[in-house]
Amino acid sequence: MPKTYCPECDSVVSLENPREGMLFPCPDCGIELEVISVDPFDVYFPYEEEDDWDDDWDDDEDDDDDWEDEDE
């Protein structure tokens, strides 16, 4: 059975038949994990839509005026 470590609590995590994209809770700390690789077996925190870094980007193009060119 493949084994790896939880990125949150470092406990050993093993699954009988892991599939990439599979979500499951860590048996020790309970945090939700996602299988990101089967060979070698590896898990990480699942991607969540609300964590998308693009949502934090300021789309206001007028802010470009705040930057001064070093050559000026």
Image (cartoon, rainbow, N blue to C red):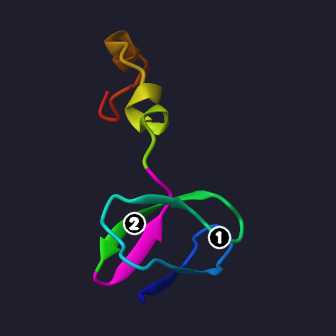
Task: Decide whether residue 40 is among the magenta residues.
Answer: yes
Compare marks 1 and 2 and give the one earlier in the sequence.
Answer: 1
Residue drawn at the location 28% of the way across and 82% of the way down:
39
Rendered image quadrant of residue 53: top left
* Rendered image: mark on residue 27: 1
Residue drawn at the location 32% of the way across and 84% of the way down:
40
- Dot 2: few (<14), some (14–19), or many (≥20) neighbours within 10 Å? some
Q: Amino acid at mark 1?
A: Pro
The outermost residue toward the front is: 16
Rendered image quadrant of residue 35: bottom left
Residue drawn at the location 38% of the way across and 32% of the way down:
54
* Rendered image: mark on residue 35: 2
Residue 40 vertical placement versus 36 (above, below)? below
Q: Which residues are magenta?
A: 39-46
Q: State how far apart marks 1 and 2 are (Cα).
A: 14 Å
Q: Amino acid at mark 2?
A: Val
Residue 48 image point, x, y percent:
45, 41
Between circles 1 and 2, the one closer to the viewer is 1
* Local SS, label 1: loop
- In the displayed structure image, the side of residue 5 where residue 9 appears, left or right: right
* Local SS, label 2: strand
Q: Nearer the viewer, residue 56 or 38?
A: 38
Residue 17 image point, x, y percent:
36, 76
Marks 1 & 2, CB-CB < 8 Å contact? no
Rendered image quadrant of residue 20: bottom left
Residue 22 vertical placement versus 67 (above, below)? below
Residue drawn at the location 35% of the way across and 35% of the way down:
70
* Rendered image: mark on residue 51: none
Residue 46 vertical placement versus 16 (above, below)? above
